[in-house]
Image: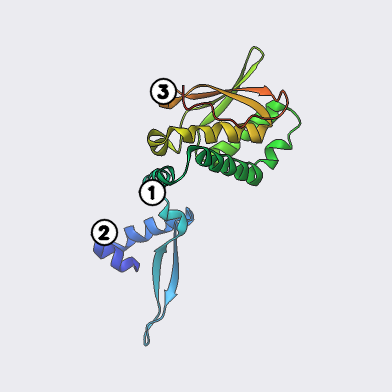
C-alpha cells in the first residue's frame, strides 16, 4: 500500500503513517519501491520484508507435531530415533565447528550457549563442584515436545555431538522442573547416542 492508503485504512494522518513507516524501515521490517502507473508521477508503495513476516503468529509447531504423528504411525520406533540422530548430526555439522574449535570444555560451553540462543533457547552454564551443568529455561519446541516427548532426545544428542562430551539430562521442563538441566562430562570414550527413555 501507499502511505495515503495506509492512512485511510488506519484512520491516521499521513504524517503519522510516514513516521511509523520510517521507524519500521530502520528496523528492516518494511521496504518500498516506486510504482509507475502510466501517466503521472510514480508512487511509493510499501511492503513487508521477510523479517516482518516472522513477527506474525506461526503454525509451524502444529505442522511439525502432525508430521511426527504421521511418521510414528508409518515407521518403527527405531527408525524415528535414527531420524532424530541424523537431524542432530546435521545441525552439529552445520553449526558446531565454531564450538568444537574452542580449546577447553568451558569455552565450548560458552560458544554452545550462544548457538542455542540463535536456535531460540534461553540457556546458561555453570560449574558446580567438579560438574559442568547446562540449563535451558525455554524450549522453542515446547508445543511439539508435549505431544512427542522423544523430541527431547534431539537436544541431548545435539549437545553431546557439539561438545564432544558425555551428556546426561538431570531435569526437564516437561516433567514440571523449572528448567532442563544437562550434566556435561568429558567424553569417556565415544559419545553415546542411545536414547535416555524420554524426560525424567
Label 2 belongs to which residue? 12
- What separation in Å lies between label 2 and label 3 (alpha carbons)? 49 Å
Nearer the N terminus, badge 2 or badge 3? 2
Image quadrant in which you'd find residue 114: top right
**Crowding at mark 2 (Cα within 10 Å: few <14, some 14-19, many 20+):** few
Which one is in front, 38 or 168? 168
**Label at residue 175:** 3
Q: What element carries label 1?
A: helix
Q: Earlier in the sequence, mark 1 or mark 3?
A: 1
How far apart marks 2 and 1 lie (CA) works out to 38 Å
Residue designated by label 1: 63
Q: Tell which circle, 2 or 1, labels the residue nearer the N-terminal end.
A: 2
Q: Is mark 3 on a helix, strand or loop?
A: helix
Residue lying at 74% horizontally and 37% vertically, measured from the top left: 101
Q: Position of residue 147 (x, y in %)?
A: 38, 36
Whether 136 is drawn above or below 58: the answer is above
The structure residue drawn at horizontal position 45% and vertical position 60%, both measured from the top left corner, is 49
Q: Which residue is at 67% across, 28% downward?
A: 165
Measured in 3D between alpha carbons, the distance from the residue under mark 1 to the one under mark 3, in whole angstroms, is: 24 Å
Residue plotted at (43% across, 42% down): 72
Residue lying furthest right: 103
> Quick check: can you spot residue 70?
yes
Amino acid at each position: 500500500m501507499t502511505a495515503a492508503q495506509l492512512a485511510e485504512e488506519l484512520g491516521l494522518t499521513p504524517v503519522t503513517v510516514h513516521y511509523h513507516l520510517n521507524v519500521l524501515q530502520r528496523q528492516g521490517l518494511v521496504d518500498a519501491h516506486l510504482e509507475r502507473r502510466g501517466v503521472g508521477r510514480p508512487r511509493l508503495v510499501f511492503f513487508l520484508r521477510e523479517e516482518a513476516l516472522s513477527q506474525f503468529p506461526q503454525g509451524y509447531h502444529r505442522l511439525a507435531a502432525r508430521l511426527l504423528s504421521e511418521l510414528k504411525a508409518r515407521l518403527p520406533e527405531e527408525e524415528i530415533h535414527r531420524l532424530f540422530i541424523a537431524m542432530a548430526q546435521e545441525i552439529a555439522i552445520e553449526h558446531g565447528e565454531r564450538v568444537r574449535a574452542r580449546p577447553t570444555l568451558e569455552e565450548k560451553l560458552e560458544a554452545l550457549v550462544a548457538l542455542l540462543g540463535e536456535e531460540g533457547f534461553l540457556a546458561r552454564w555453570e560449574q558446580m563442584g567438579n560438574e559442568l551443568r547446562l540449563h535451558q529455561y525455554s524450549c522453542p519446541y515446547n508445543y511439539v515436545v508435549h505431544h512427542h516427548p522423544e523430541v527431547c532426545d534431539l537436544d541431548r544428542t545435539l549437545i553431546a555431538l557439539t561438545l564432544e562430551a558425555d551428556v546426561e539430562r538431570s531435569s526437564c521442563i516437561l516433567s514440571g522442573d523449572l528448567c532442563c538441566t544437562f550434566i556435561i562430562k568429558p567424553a569417556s570414550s565415544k559419545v553415546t547416542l542411545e536414547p535416555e527413555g524420554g524426560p525424567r
